[in-house]
Amino acid sequence: MKKLESSLTNMALVLTGVAVVMGCLLALVNHVTAGPIEKQKNDALEQGIKEVMQANDLTVTRTDTVTATDSKGKEQEFVIYKNEKGAAVQSSAMGFGGELKVLVGFDTEGNILGYTLLEHQETPGLGAKADQWFQAGQKGSIIGKNPAEGLTVSKDGGNVDAITASTITSRAFLLAVTNAYNAFMGNATDANSSATKPMEEK
């Protein structure tokens, strides 16, 4: 077999061939893993909804995506998973280290049933404590409270104890929860809703 001549044209052809093969392999891997990754995300979301709604068995009857102006005048998107107990709402606010995303469960009256942090970039050991600090039985618990009565840190004259040395994160978290409440109760301004098909949970 004749050895391939070392020239600019041949090198370009070889590199192009390698790039095409690698591209095909990456596309194949993406195709194979896309389904399991999507299923894992959906399973995690379903589990999160059950957790914040304090229910092991419920059905999401309607999912709304609402674009609204929050209490700070910033337009953002909320996802509302309505169910027989009320709704779980995805919301966010800017914390100390970046965007803080939460999923909050409300009963039909707007009382907080539970919450979970979906994403954050807060400082480990400080702002990152938000995942537990505001849970039932903790110092800053918001469970059972209704945001209509105000959710403000005690430093600002409110009734919620802020995370030690993380007042900015605490304010952002409470803002995200309040924004979620307003979206659920229809109090958000300039709201536009688009509904999607129901999601079954088991």
Image (tube, rainbow, N blue to C red):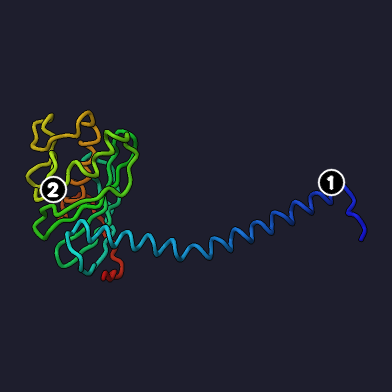
Instruction: Using the image, determine if residue 28 lies above or below residue 135.
Output: below
Q: Earlier in the sequence, mark 1 or mark 2?
A: 1
Tags 1 and 2 touching, CB below 8 Å: no
Residue type of the residue flagged with mark 2: Ala
* Among the 4 quarters of the image, the one containing residue 1: bottom right
Q: Nearer the viewer, mark 1 or mark 2?
A: 2
Q: Position of residue 62 (x, y in %)?
A: 24, 67
Residue at 26%, 71% (x, y): give it: 202
For this rendering, which residue is in front, 126 or 93?
Answer: 126
* Among the 4 quarters of the image, the one containing residue 162: top left
Q: Position of residue 43 (x, y in %)?
A: 34, 63
Secondary structure, mark 2, is loop
Task: Give the side of residue 6 with respect to residue 50, left or right.
Answer: right
Please name the residue that numbered disc 1 is placed on: 8
Please name the residue that numbered disc 2 is placed on: 136
Residue type of the residue flagged with mark 1: Leu
Residue at the right extreme, as displayed: 2
